[in-house]
Image (cartoon, helix red, strand yellow):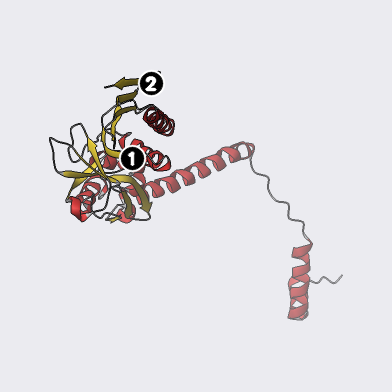
């Protein structure tokens, strides 16, 4: 009986045929993947959570260091715009620098800074602070606008005031054409006179012009205005009264009393009833 060994057959076969046969045998085998152990299957969700948590912590830590610890977002520049006559731009810039310079721009509280600046620089009507990333703080200033000059007998100097009654500073009366108002109260630069004085004055001037009432002088007190007509009549008007209605009453009374040929000394409109005094 004749036997042929595998090695002899391999030797007799062509090498290419042998490789093809060997590859078919390998690929024909079914490879069954091994299932993960029970413990590993149960641990996979927890492992995923741990990996995600570590990644998030590392990311947040990196952001914290970048934003708050590194110099990439520290304030290094302060820009001030809009200062002219009534706000010192250099002083304001120094105050802002003292509060924000070198700090993280994310820690700058702009509303609080605006409030503090307005308290210290009252020559400004409004102040806006905003961030320019990554390292700048800009400050926009809108200064107060003078609307009139105030004076009184005790202080002959003329002071500029704005619509809120804020005293902006001294000025020579011949250097401006602003209206002059006699105010019977203390006048100090950097403080307020009666805040309603300027609106009262403007409303009175409009009403007097509308009714063609001749007035020789006007003085303002904290709670009322005092006028003198060209006929010498002393008039009092409460600041809480309608100026248009008050001037209408005055014009009608002056006309009526003139027709009656009665000499009036004083008209008082500060109360609910009109008080007329005669000579």
Between the C-alphas of marks 2 and 1, the distance is 20 Å
What residue would you read off at disc 1?
Answer: 214
Q: Is residue 8 visible?
A: no
Is label 1 in a helix, a strand or a loop? Answer: loop
Q: Is residue 30 visible?
A: yes
Is label 2 in a helix, a strand or a loop? Answer: loop
Instruction: Give coordinates of residue 104: x percent, y percent.
Output: 32, 48
Instruction: Give coordinates of residue 268: x percent, y percent.
Output: 33, 23
The quarter of the rendered structure image containing the C terminus is top left
Q: Residue at x 48, y 46 (%)?
A: 55
Q: Are marks 2 and 1 in contact (CB under 8 Å)?
A: no
What residue would you read off at disc 2?
Answer: 274
Instruction: Give coordinates of residue 21: x percent, y percent.
Output: 78, 71
Tag nearer the camera, 2 or 1: 1
Viewer-proximal residue among 257 and 90:
257
Q: Residue at x 29, y 34 (%)?
A: 231
């Amino acid at each position: 009986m004749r036997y042929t060994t595998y090695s002899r057959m391999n030797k007799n076969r062509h090498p290419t045929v042998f490789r093809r046969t060997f590859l078919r045998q390998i690929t024909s085998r079914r490879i069954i993947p091994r299932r993960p152990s029970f413990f590993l299957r149960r641990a996979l969700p927890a492992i995923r959570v741990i990996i995600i948590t570590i990644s998030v912590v590392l990311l947040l830590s990196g952001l914290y260091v970048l934003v708050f610890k590194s110099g990439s977002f520290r304030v290094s520049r302060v820009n001030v715009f809009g200062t002219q006559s009534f706000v010192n731009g250099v002083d304001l810039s120094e105050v802002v620098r003292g509060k924000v310079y070198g700090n993280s721009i994310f820690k700058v509280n702009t509303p609080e800074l605006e409030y503090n600046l307005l308290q210290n620089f009252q020559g400004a009507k409004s102040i806006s602070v905003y961030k320019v990333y990554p390292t700048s703080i800009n400050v926009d200033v809108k200064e107060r606008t003078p609307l009139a000059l105030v004076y009184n007998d005790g202080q002959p100097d003329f002071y500029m005031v704005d619509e809120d009654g804020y005293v902006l500073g001294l000025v020579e009366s011949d250097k401006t054409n602003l209206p002059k108002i006699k105010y019977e109260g203390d006048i100090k630069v950097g403080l307020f006179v009666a805040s309603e004085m300027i609106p009262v004055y403007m409303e009175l001037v409009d009403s007097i012009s509308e009714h063609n009432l001749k007035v020789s002088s006007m003085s303002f007190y904290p709670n009322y205005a005092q006028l003198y007509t060209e006929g010498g009549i002393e008039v009092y008007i409460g600041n809480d009264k309608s100026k248009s209605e008050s001037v209408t009453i005055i014009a009608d009374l002056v006309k009526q009393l003139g027709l009656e040929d009665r000499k009036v000394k004083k008209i008082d409109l500060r109360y609910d009833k009109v008080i007329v005094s005669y000579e």
